[in-house]
């Protein structure tokens, strides 16, 4: 039983085979025009400068803005200062009757004030970094709200810890 020849086998996966074509001419230019890839969301051309005397150009790409690491660090340090101020409240009030509450609260106040200093200094640095005008091809930073929140949280944490120390000492001395 013989069957007539059918169409060639076509795999259902992978690239489809291309039909046979003539080999390229040996006299063709090896430098064929290749169009640039289409711009994506992350790589947008900012400007194109032609290199004089040639058919080539130099593409300057836009750099996507980044969130400032100093702004994030400022917010983390500010939240840390608030959390340490809660420890000042706990140790200052719970140890007030036994006499060690003021000492423990004082130690944690120092930690909270250091976290506040870090939050404020990182926040000020981040705000300067964000405010600086970017040059073409340089990174532009964002995060002004993060740096402001870090500064506010740091100052709030230090103020709360000082109030908690005063409250703990008042309870301990009464």
Image (cartoon, rainbow, N blue to C red):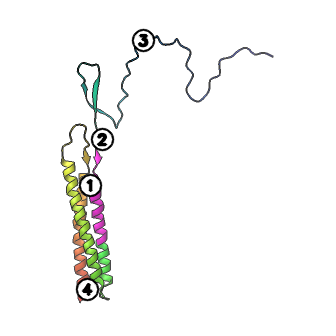
Q: Which residue is mark 2?
A: 64
Q: Earlier in the sequence, mark 3 or mark 4?
A: 3
* Residue mark closest to the camera, 3 vs 2: 3
| Disc ID at residue 28 | 3
Real-space Cα separation, disc 1 to disc 2, in angstroms: 18 Å
Q: Nearer the viewer, residue 27 or 100?
A: 27
Above or below 158: residue 173: below
| Disc ID at residue 70 | 1
Residue 104, picture quadrant = bottom left
* Residue mark closest to the camera, 1 vs 2: 1
Q: Which residue is mark 4?
A: 171
Name the magenta segment's main secondary structure: helix
Q: Regarding mark 2 in the picture, which secondary structure is present there?
A: loop
Q: Position of residue 54 (x, y in %)?
A: 27, 19
Real-space Cα separation, disc 3 to disc 1, in angstroms: 56 Å
* Residue mark closest to the camera, 3 vs 1: 3
């Amino acid at each position: 039983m013989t069957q007539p020849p059918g169409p060639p086998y076509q795999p259902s996966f992978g690239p489809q085979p291309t039909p046979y074509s003539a080999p390229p001419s040996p006299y063709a230019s090896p430098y064929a025009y290749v169009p640039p890839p289409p711009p994506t969301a992350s790589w947008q051309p900012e400007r194109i400068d032609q290199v004089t005397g040639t058919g080539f150009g130099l593409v300057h790409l836009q750099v996507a803005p980044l969130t400032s690491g100093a702004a994030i660090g400022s917010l983390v340090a500010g939240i840390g200062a608030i959390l340490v101020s809660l420890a000042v409240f706990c140790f200052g009030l719970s140890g007030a009757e036994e006499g060690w509450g003021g000492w423990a609260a004082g130690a944690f106040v120092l930690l909270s004030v250091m976290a506040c200093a870090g939050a404020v200094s990182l926040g000020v640095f981040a705000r300067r970094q964000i405010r600086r005008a970017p040059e073409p091809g340089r990174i532009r930073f964002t995060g002004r709200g993060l740096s402001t929140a870090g500064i506010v949280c740091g100052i709030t944490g230090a103020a709360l810890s000082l109030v908690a120390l005063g409250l703990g000492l008042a309870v301990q001395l009464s």
